[in-house]
Image: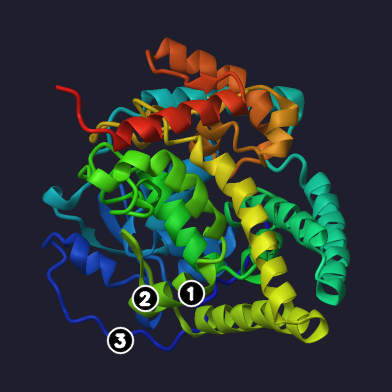
Amino acid sequence: MSASRPDDARAPARPREPPRDAATPLTLEEVARHDGRGGSLWTVIDGEVYDISEFARDHPGGAIIRLAAGRQADALLESYHSSAATGRVRAVLRRRARHVGSLRAEDRAPRGDPAFFTTVRARVEAHLASRGLDRHHGARASAIELVLVALLLALCWGLRAFTGSLAAAAASGLLIGRLGFLQHSGNHAAVHKRARDNRRVGLIMDALGGSSRVWSVEHQLAHHLHPNTLGFDNDCEIGRPMLRFHPGIRRRWWHRGQHVTTFVVMSVGLLKWVVSDIVDHLRGRVGNARFHADARDWARLLVGKSLWVILQVLVPAVLCGWELALASTFVMMATGAYYLESIFIVNHIQPGLVPPRGVHWSIEQVLATANWSAGSRLANFVSGGLNHQIEHHLFPGLSTALYPEISPIVRETCREFGLPYNDLPGFTAAWRSTFAYLRELGLPARR
């Protein structure tokens, strides 16, 4: 892998740390202050606190290491690295990163029994090696898809901008959905071996009017670390208090119709990026997850938003009038939202997917997630790999093209460890179940 400097590698010199007794345990609050501010990055692995500010500059995986700053990162380390690489990273930290101290016992997240993940990861790695398949298998196909989708989107943009065509707008929305799946894989470092190439694919999010920085924090941290857990996962709190996606949220009378309301509100899911990302940068927080936005993050955000408004709103307005411009932009973003969000929503909003606390992070993923049409390569392509949501949550850095290949292994290992492998028979069945569950969550509790 080639080295890549993180986005904040040129941050100003870090302030001097006041002298401290190395034997005194650190609090999680102290660690959280070193999330990139002033160029200082601390992380916690196995209960030990490391200053990774210098190491991050040469991190082979690139800027994705910023996600580990200011927090406990055991799950990130294990889910994004192979068995061998996980051991090497621990050795490199001890050798190249400054050991700051130990995290106090009461702040340490419970680790749980890693036996399931150790077993399933070893089996998946052995299977891929026996088939001669690389972790980033399918990178060329992703590159071809990216070029084709970008060209088609440019053509549709021209038709929409000059004629106000709503058909071209709808087609643009579907193409945006495909790009959304690609940026998802890019920001998960699952497209290419080279960190800089993953980063370039991940920046598609900024070109679509969003923010790759906000998306990474909200998705890879808030959602992936503790899916379907209140106070951690933003996805199960979307629209709160208007919507009730989790049984732990207080039920209100207006939730009775949320199985219909949710479907209507989904239409503006992508448009909210334009405003909410700016608010998140100002607050330094995306829902339940804190983050530090440096000058480069702000520059990328403002340039991306400005270009989106110019290309998607102002230019069409000048060429075909405000009414057609706004209507076609809404149709485009609504179509993209329905494509993307319909795929995402059915994977976690299902009955019985609330995991207990204290188990190993990998078991949390299995207990909080549902697949549909597992093993189907067609469904895998249409959904950007997200019909294999269990495999994705266990191995987010693995190419989505490999999910149908490894799903039988994950299914069998779950069976051996007494874990459910939730797999709905198809997308229609998954949506039917989600719709019924949303309705159930909105109804008064039965006595």
Kind of residue at disc 2:
Ser
For label 3, the SS is loop
Structural distance between the alpha carbons of marks 1 and 2? 29 Å
Question: In front here: 97 or 293?
Answer: 293
Q: Residue at position x 60%, y 32% from top?
A: 387
Contact (CB < 8 A) between labels 1 and 2?
Answer: no
Q: From where the camera sits, is residue 354 visible?
A: no
Which of marks 2 and 3 precedes in the sequence?
A: 3
Mark positioned earlier in the residue sequence (1 or 3): 3
Residue type at mark 1: give it: Val
- State the residue in front, 202 or 275: 275
Vertically, is 7 above or below 315?
A: above
Q: CA distance from mark 1 to mark 3?
A: 33 Å
The mark found on residue 40 in the picture is: 2
Residue located beneath label 1 in the image:
275
440 to 68, vertically: above or below: above
**Residue carrying label 3:** 15
Q: Position of residue 271 (x, y in %)?
A: 56, 66
Q: Quadrant of residue 135?
A: top right
* Image-based side of 239 in relation to 325, left or right: left
Crowding at label 2, few (<14), some or many (≥20) Cα neighbours within 10 Å?
Answer: many
Q: Amino acid at mark 3?
A: Pro
Q: Nearer the viewer, residue 332 or 187?
A: 332
Q: Is residue 419 left or right of residue 299?
A: left
Location of residue 63 in the rendering, given as x and y in whole percent from the top left corner: 54, 65
Q: Quadrant of the N terminus?
A: bottom right
Crowd tier of the residue under label 1, counting other residues whose Cα lies within 10 Å: few below 14, some 14–19, many 20 or above: few
Q: Position of residue 37 (x, y in %)?
A: 36, 79
